[in-house]
Image (cartoon, helix red, strand yellow):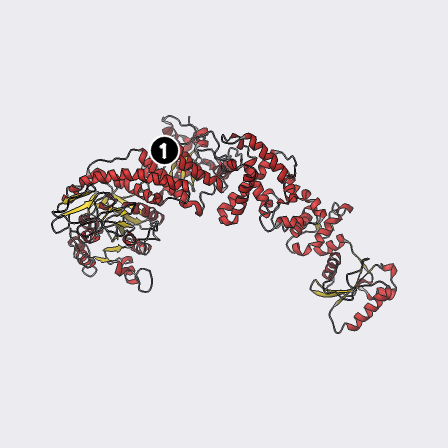
Amino acid sequence: MSIMQASATLPMPVVTQLQAVFQRDAEADCVALVWPNPLAALAVEQVVEGRKVRAIYCVSELAMREALVKHHQDRKETSERLVLLSGFAETDLAMDVLARIWRNEPQRISPWKTLQQLIRVRDIDPRLTRKQSRWVAEAMLNGVERYQGKISFGEILDEETAWRAIAMAHLNYQEATLDLQSVLSWSTKGDVSALITALPGDIRDNLGDWLARGLPDTHEVVSTLLLNDQGSDLLAVALACSVLFSSNIERLQALDLTQLHISRGIFRERFLGGKKIEFRVLQPLGEVAVVLVRQWIGALGFPSYARFLSKAELILASLDMQAAAEHSSLLPCGLHARFSAFASALDQALDGGESMAAESALQQIEEHRLAGLDRYSETVARANMAMRLLRWLKQAPNVDGTAVSLIGDYIEQGGFCDWARTEIWAGDAEESLSTVYQKLSQHVGRYRERQNQAFGQQLASIARGDHLPARFIPVERALDDLVAPLAEQGQVLLLVLDGMSEAVYRQLSADLTRNHWLELQPVSAQGDACLVAALPTVTQVSRCSLLSGALCEGNANDEKKAFSSHPQLKKLASTKFPPQVFHKQDLSQSGSGSLHSSVRGIIAGTEHRVLAVVINAIDDQLSSSSQVKVDWSFETVALLRHVMEAAREAGRVVIITSDHGHVLDHDSVYQQSADENGERYHPVAPSITPSELEVLLSGERVVTANKQVILPWSERLRYTKSRSHGYHGGGSLQEVVIPLGVYINAATRQRVEGWREVPRRLPAWWYSTKAIQSDTPSAVDEPTVSVEAPTKKAAGKKQAVAEVVEDMFGFASPAKALSKSAPVVATSDWVAELLSSPVYGQVRDRAGRTAISDEQMQTLLRLMEKHRWQIMEAVLCSELLIPKLRIRGFLAGAQKLLNVDGYPILSVERDSQTVRLNVADLKKQFEIQ
């Protein structure tokens, strides 16, 4: 045996005993321990509790004396503490030796006493100190440094706390509680399989006893999986169980039940070592795993849990259960299967089939737990756009009419249609969707082409300047008919987004609402308004006509002069602060992309009554050959947020419009022009005959030398060889119809006389209002949660749970729970009976002046009845003529009156933006028939 061995260390019981000694007496030295086994070396040096100790194994009493004498001689030169290990007890040593050692006696190593000193408890539960539980003390001592300071033991060490310390020390179990969800979460942190493999035998043998304390029903299956080398895959296996042992799985019509039973048997052999564990135990294991991952979906990034989902898919595939996995509402393969199902249903609907299958398939996509993730958001959004286009097609779009009717239809529907077309045009990463979107685009394109052809036949009236309804304002009349009347009441900003089409405006208007801008319309208005472009629909003609207040052609300098000298605007403005227009070159701050400080100051100030700003971001994008798709918003339209914020500060009414629209390059066809005058127009010449895709126009609103022009009515024609992102100048609805909206910020207190706030209007086909029901489950892995009827104050909290798991097995209709408990009743006097009931009267009196009126309540209830007790917020805004910014306040007022004692009679789902009315509880609560 060597005298000193660098790698030699003290046995753990010796170390823990010394830790206890030093904690008890920081100055302890010459400590003798009864230890019968020799060390790896005659002397071992080691640091214990921050003190360097020199441990010597003594084979005789003489050796102990020699070590004590030498330590006494060397004390001045070293700070080492001496530890003497031997097999001698107190009765084996002479008095002179006992007098020199700590506490005058050798210390016996007792794991329980050592542990008691280390964790500083007064006593230990007698059930732990039984002979067969000695391993508990040793396990705690062997890992004391991993839990010390993290666990409060109190005065008495009990079994629960002992196990908590062992789990923390040997399994790195840091969870606050012991339950199935916590165990599943722990299994994802680190290499759990390696920790299980490294466990001492006693801990492995008693692992089930620990788990049984927090997992009374599932401890056997969890311990079996852990001991069967599935520790690191525990969550993935549990997710596989959510499909394989779901109570819903046998109802899937496409599943082979024989294969299901075979796969379950293989699972038992492979993962459970052949143990016959009942299904009722495996089901909650899967359900809790699903609940855990659903929580992570809302709180963590996809990479945090993606590998567990992928592993679960691999497990199911290895069991020949891929078909069942594709019915999962949590696994990625389930979402991809739903994409394929939607593509198939959409394809069949385009071939003449019913659209309800596609509606149901889309709903299944949206109900999948991963559908809301950023990685899938564009695909889901495109699927919604595709469904909207299908609804538009199924309503048999109007393809004929007068200029007025076609313009009105385009404002109300066509612009939304073109927005949706743009979204699906480039296809999707999902091949099945990309293929059917191409087919859908062709179907929609043919209808839109027919509409443009019909409009082309009516363009002559636009060129002549025939009378139009008041809401369709010729671009040259906008200053006189719109800007000046509004400027009479206060500060106005005319915001011209050069090249903006109705499709872009409809997309942008959603962002205006999100940024607290309210749209205004004249009280007498019968629908949305627009400007009508001058011809040809190019910037130098239509924008100059807009900013001049007269039909003309010119550049930015011409526009500045004409705008500042416009008679009506000059009359309203002061001489010192005349009407002023800012163009692209005026707006940007030198050295940065922000709004120029002087321009911002003018817009944010109140001295200038009438201002105009021209932003070219959209037109610049059209001129580019880049095929990058842009989602138009406050962020993507350069300087838009800066300008709107400055206008808000001044309390300005903002008129948002354009000078012309545009068509996008969707398989455009080049046609050579005799005169390369423009992208989508060319002058009339004796040698030129319009093609079948063109129309020859003449009239006062044609701003050319001879008042004549040839324009393509088709969106597919271009006169430039090089391709661009888009073009303008032609006579399609997209180019001639100029979007128009008048806005005021919600923070502005002033009212505009003769104008009213209106909600954002969407066509009827933008959202589905049909209830979809099915008796076939769409998902196999949705947790089963029973929700009892709510009582009094607990009702609100329980309803929150109910709203999450309302469609607990993924059945098709989110309205089905309502349809069961609240069947649609025939329209009767129940609303009048409610409003006149004593209970409602008391509630209304308590609400005081803040309550919504009886007329408003009656309208809301009738509307809910009409829509089978559930309605989208957007539809509610449109029907009630309440802006989206105001609807939540209105609904809160309605809930205050209807949700008596906390009962969730009228509920609002924030995520799905759906309002629901439980009419059965309503009638019961207000004691009406």
Residue 248 in the image: x percent, y percent?
A: 53, 32
- Give the vertical position of 801 relative to 13 (above or below): above
Q: How many marks?
A: 1
* 673 sits left or right of 866 in the view: left
The answer, for residue 300, to whether it is visible in the render is no
Residue 13 place in picture, x, y as percent: 75, 56
Report the side of 862 relative to 821 (left or right): left
Residue occupying image coordinates x 58% and y 41%: 237
The residue labelled by disc 1 is: 349
Q: Is residue 708 left or right of residue 732?
A: left
Element type at mark 1: helix
Q: Position of residue 229 (x, y in %)?
A: 64, 45
Report whether 636 appears left or right of 452: right
Q: Residues within 10 Å of mark 1 (few under 14, many from 20)?
A: some
In this orientation, which residue lies closer to the viewer: 333 or 405? 333
Q: Amino acid at mark 1?
A: Ala
Q: Residue at x 50, y 41 (%)?
A: 331
Q: Nearer the viewer, residue 175 or 241?
A: 241
The residue nearer to you, when weighing 461 against 100, is: 461
Q: Would residue 443 be visible to someone looking at this image?
A: yes
**Residue drawn where x is 36% and y is 42% of the image:** 887
